[in-house]
Amino acid sequence: MPSSLLAARTPPARLREARRRLLDTGDLADDALAPALTRSWRRSRDFGLAPTGRFAGAPHASSAQLARALDHQHEFVAHARPVMEFLFDQTRDTDSMVILADAQGMVLHALGDAGFVDRAQRVALRPGASWHEQWRGTNAIGTAIAEAAPVVVHGSEHYLERNAFLTCTAAPIADPAGRLLGVLDISGDHRGYHRHTLALVRSAARIIEHRLFDTRHAAGLRLRLHAQPEGLGTVTEGLLALSEDGWIVGANGVALAMLGLPPGSIGALTLERVLPLDIATLAAWSRGSAAHALKRADGSTLWLRVEGGRSLGVRPAAPAAPAVADALARLDTGDSAMQAAIGRARRVLDKPIALLLQGESGVGKELFARAVHRSSARRDAPFVAVNCAALPETLIEAELFGYRPGAFTGAARDGAPGRIREAHGGTLFLDEIGDMPSALQTRLLRVLQEREVVPLGGGRAQAVDFRLICATHRNLREAIDAGRFREDLYYRLNGLALQLPPLRQRGDQAALVAGMLRELLPGRDVRLAPEVAHAFARHRWPGNLRQLHNALATACALLDEHEDEIGWGHLSDDLAEDLRERPAPAAPVADAVDLRAQSERTVRQVIEACAGNLSEAARRLGISRNTLYRKLRELRLR
Ligand SMILES: Nc1ncnc2c1ncn2[C@@H]1O[C@H](COP(=O)(O)OP(=O)(O)OP(=O)(O)O)[C@@H](O)[C@H]1O
């Protein structure tokens, strides 16, 4: 990772002059500011932001969206929290805050001095707020993401004048595969700026990366590297994770820099290609805890310590700690079909049995898969979800199996490990498996049989260990009969099939509604008006839990502070209309063509209205993104 891009302070007179020129002419001189600051101000301008005057606003996640983001990033936040508390202790009473944001710049967690928090709240330095440059221009969180480097943004270096009272220092945090996970930031009053903050934040970000790395690769072979033996075990060490056949499957930024490798080498190179070291020597070294010196081709010495090595038959993996709260139990809100599915999933929780989740779109199949993962012994390893319906055939292949450098036109120069290898040690969730093209079904079958992946473009097979969970809304038996799905693959996927019930058949609708309302408006006692509850109970809910959740989120947004009952007026017009309507008679067959044309028109119009944003279009249509992709394919609009 490059060193700090914005560490040197810009004199106030230069900043004033640059801002005046930007406002007058719409641009800056190339040498007016530090290069990274110039790039960031130009990006901010291109996002259409006005440095002065009224703030155009930025998205803020609802409490439910934030809860979901925290759930998805549970491992990241769990490792960051203690480090943030330590940082907070170091900076206590300095009028500042310690902030963790995700890779899109959304604040996930914040700790702060009470006095400063009040002022920070006014510019929304709080969980749920987005600090992406797109919304707030140059700022440490957004600019660290854009520049992929640690940054300090001080006072009037902030693009928006309203943020000029802040001094902010941020460092990106990468996951063990080298991808951006989020950003750690210390923000405070600009009068309290201290040059040492940058070093503090960078070290803290590295500690979080180390913790994630050690957890992710706890069961595998790990190498610690440093130029001096005393540096091993400190935050300045390099970390590598290896597969049992010697492929580099994880590395931190320090190791990549030490070995002169780009992030894309993870999953695409063996250690032997990089260091004069073979797997037999590593196996021997992993039996002790001594540091070993290694002479490199350029004459320099590298010190190494080898750890782990279950895969080399050296040490068994430590058993995972028990779950704090069982995620599967939380899905049980009293419906007997769900209870049966949860009970059966629990019986095979830590067994090598593939799960096949079936059910209509929006019944909560992905949520169920995540709960199985979180309740299993693999909970601290990755949960990797791939939507087989959302990607074109050529991309799914590269996405799943990874590729070697130059494997195909347009491939990233350094290759990619592929989602299957990323799930090593954890759970691979293949959503909409019924939509997987047949050539890929054959490749997937081979991976499941051999438990090895061969990346696109060839190379050696690499061992993988993952729990497989697939989901589909299709009837796979019919797809097999129609020749669209391989029967042998079906039996591999279907160690245990679980049918999740549609909402209209669930007997726990009231408990689900109450749970969602508690999640949407924590601390408030909000319920449905009796006539709305009655209409909800009779409704068919074609979009299932997704549709119910969206309906309640809209209602909560329309509820006044003092109101505690959701009535007709809190529902969107189209839902209220549907709820009041009698069930429509079945359309005669002759109308089918018209219906298709009408459906096509509606989908086109909504996508146009959303400027091509398919997620937003799916939301407005009240269907899932998967269903929209399917519809586009059926209507040949894609
Ligand atoms: N128990 C629940 N409590 C609250 N919200 C839920 C629950 N289950 C599902 N949801 C909501 O429903 C949405 C759909 O869930 P999920 O994506 O798991 O369904 P799915 O069956 O996988 O859908 P698809 O087949 O369209 O991929 C979620 O984003 C969430 O908002």
Image (tube, rainbow, N blue to C red):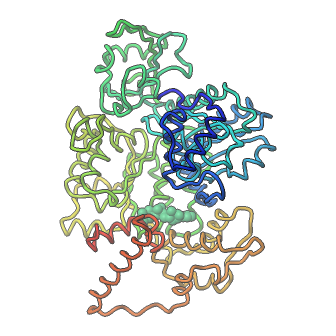
Between residues 237 and 14, which one lies in front from this camera angle?
14
Q: Is residue 339 left or right of residue 309?
A: right
Closer-to-camera residue (393/91):
91
**Residue 194 vertical position relative to residue 589 in the rendered view, above or below:** above
* Residue for point 51% across, 72% down: 547
Lateral position of residue 238 relative to residue 567, left or right? left
Q: Position of residue 338 (x, y in %)?
A: 51, 66
Where residue 318 appears, as percent x and y from the top left, is 51, 31
Query: Is residue 499 among what the camera can see?
Result: no
Residue 110 figure quarter: top right
Q: Residue at x 47, y 36 (%)?
A: 30
Answer yes or no: is residue 241 visible.
yes
Spot occupied by residue 341 in the image (x, y as percentages of width and height): 47, 62
Tally the numbered discs. Answer: 0
Residue at position x 28%, y 44% from top?
401
Left or right side of 375 for 513: right
Q: Is residue 400 above or below residue 332?
A: above
